[in-house]
Each structure stands twice: as C-alpha cells, then as structure tokens.
C-alpha cells in the first residue's frame, strides 16, 4: 500500500504499525523517527519563516493572508506523481495541518483513486482508536492491539487523578496564552496532577495571563505546539514579563518546566503516553532527561 501522511501524528502511527516502508509522502514537519524519513518526499510546505515567534505566527493565522491551514501549501503535482492508495489527514485543528476538505479537493482535481481518511482524536482513548482505524485499513490489527495494550498498561502504572495532586498549567502557546487541551488534561491527570482551565477533550482557546495569576498554579509546564525546547526557552520572557508571574507558587518553588511539545504532547499519536510518564516524573520530583527546569533548559 502507498501511504501519504499529511499529519505528523499519522506518520508516527504509520511507523509504529510497521508500515514505514509503505510511506511514500509526508509533511515538512514529520520528524519522527529521527533520520528514518529522509528519503520520503515532502508534499507540504509553509509560508512562515522558520524563526517566527509565537506572536508572529498568531498574527499570521489571524491575518487576511492566511486562514488556518492555508498557512500550509500542498504540492498537488508531487501528490499526483506519488499516486497514493491512502492519504491520512485531519480536521481537528485548522492551524496544525492541511485540512481534510482541501485534500479531498486536491484528490478530485487530479483524479486519483485514493482513500482520504481524517483522524480526529480529542482524547487518549480517541488516539488509540485512530491507531485501530489505520490498522484496519492496512491489515495491521495485531500490531495495533499490541500498541493499545502497551499504552493501557503504562497509563495504569501511573499515579492517576487525585484530589490532592498539584495544580498544573500546561502552556501550549505563549503569545497569546493557550493552555493544553484535548488529551493534555488527561496526561496531567494520569501523572497525578490537576489540570487548570481545561478538562479532557476540551478545545483550547486564548486566555488572559491575569487568569494564571488568579489560579496560582503549583506547576507550570511549557510545551508550545511545534516548538523545540530551545525555541521555547527563547520565548519564556513573554511569561516572565507578565504581572504577578514572580509570585506564582510554581515560580517561587522552582516548578516551571520546559518539555518537547511536538514529541510528547501536541500530536495525537501514541507518544502521548510518554508525555504522561514525563509529567509523572516531574510531579514526583524524579529526574527525567526529557524535561528541564526553566532555569536549566537548553537554549
């Protein structure tokens, strides 16, 4: 089967199902597994400069020149040459990837006999369901069952929600502030914390930084969508400049953390289980090489 993935999380799923050899096209943002995708053609690009700040990206999304997924260009000519049997895309977030509607339009325009499937997970259970869905289309249901069993076993081994857990603000975007939504509150709950602002499955919307001061989180975790830890560190001054920031319990107690958002938190793929484990280590005060205190993070 010839597969094109227009969503980094879908690429994760395809590879984890053992279908890396069937992947004939991917997005410019697909970066896992490291080094394994170098020979797979990119079928998307972005008009945004690579070093854009979160504020500049937000302005571009809201501006007249771009509307959501129009930030991304789909190379229809390359897609036609690849002639995929299956295209995996999404309609969950208008900013994160090429939309299902645009892909369907492109497939009709170039007259491909291609199945287009939209992955719409909003919770951890939904993510595992999308793994099952891709597996059903590709004859890899046994491997999907292994992935689900492993994920459920590892999640069950975590502390889980508790009334006495620390309050956690996960920052999915810095400027404007957007808390982690969809599956992130579940990750926090599995790790033993209490998610602030959003519950499981909820879509994130911009919030005022003054709300953070009012909520007084005990732990703050920065994992902006699409940002490396180094890039995140470069924007922490946005938070530090907010009124009341220095008085937050998380800041006073040294519980401000930086994580790799794209790898473990932003994308609806099986690695969200790793993200829950990372948070559990942070909340328990255990070292984890995949999380950095803000004052010692790479930058």
Image (cartoon, rainbow, N blue to C red):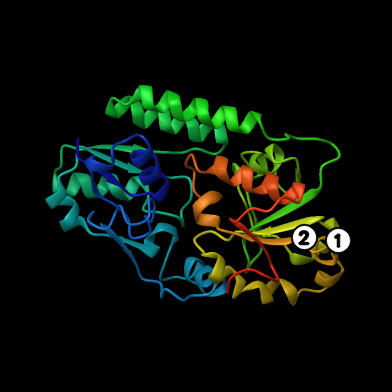
Front-lying residue, 13 or 254: 254
Q: Nearer the viewer, residue 176 or 143?
A: 143
- For the C terminus, the image quarter is bottom right
Q: Earlier in the sequence, mark 2 or mark 1?
A: 1
Q: Are marks 2 and 1 in contact (CB under 8 Å)?
A: yes
Residue in the foreground of this view, choosing between 256 and 171: 256
Report the number of numbered marks: 2
Q: Position of residue 187 (x, y in %)?
A: 64, 42
Secondary structure beneath dot 2 equals loop
Q: Quadrant of the N terminus?
A: top left
Q: Which residue is mark 1?
A: 249
Q: Please give the residue where the numbered disc 2 appears in the rendered image.
A: 255
Q: Kindly indicate the quadrant of the structure image that contains residue 218.
A: bottom right
Query: Which residue is at 56% across, 40% downward?
Result: 273
Say which quarter of the image contains residue 252: bottom right
> Which residue appears at 67% of the width and 70% of the height?
296
Rendered location of residue 51, percent (x, y): 46, 76
Q: Mark 2 against mark 1, which lies toward the viewer? A: 2
- Please, is residue 102 above or below residue 86 in the view? below
């Amino acid at each position: 089967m010839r597969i094109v993935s227009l969503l980094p999380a879908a690429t994760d799923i395809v590879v984890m199902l053992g279908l890396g050899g069937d992947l004939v096209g991917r997005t410019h943002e697909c970066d896992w597994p490291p080094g394994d995708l170098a020979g797979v053609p990119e079928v998307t690009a972005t008009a945004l400069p690579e070093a854009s700040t979160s504020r500049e990206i937000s302005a571009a999304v809201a501006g007249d020149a771009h509307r959501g997924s129009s930030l991304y260009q789909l190379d229809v000519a390359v897609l036609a040459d690849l002639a995929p049997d299956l295209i995996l895309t999404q309609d969950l977030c208008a900013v994160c990837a090429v939309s299902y509607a645009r892909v369907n339009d492109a497939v009709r325009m170039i007259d491909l006999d291609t199945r287009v499937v939209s992955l719409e997970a909003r919770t951890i259970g939904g993510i595992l369901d999308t793994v099952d869905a891709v597996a059903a289309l590709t004859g890899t249901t046994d491997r999907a069952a292994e992935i689900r069993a492993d994920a459920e076993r590892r999640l069950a081994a975590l502390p889980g929600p508790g009334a006495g857990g620390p309050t956690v603000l996960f920052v999915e975007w810095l400027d404007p502030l957007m808390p982690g939504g969809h599956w992130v509150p579940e990750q926090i709950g599995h790790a033993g914390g209490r998610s602030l602002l959003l519950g499981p499955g909820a879509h994130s919307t911009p919030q005022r930084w003054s709300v953070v001061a009012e909520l007084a989180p005990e732990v703050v975790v920065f994992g902006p969508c699409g940002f490396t830890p180094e890039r995140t560190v470069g924007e922490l001054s946005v938070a530090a400049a907010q009124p009341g920031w220095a008085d937050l319990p998380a800041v006073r107690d040294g519980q401000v953390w930086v994580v790799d958002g794209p790898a473990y938190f932003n994308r609806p793929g099986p690695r969200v289980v790793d993200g829950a484990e990372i948070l559990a280590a942070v909340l328990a005060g255990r070292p984890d090489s995949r999380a950095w205190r803000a004052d010692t993070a790479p930058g």
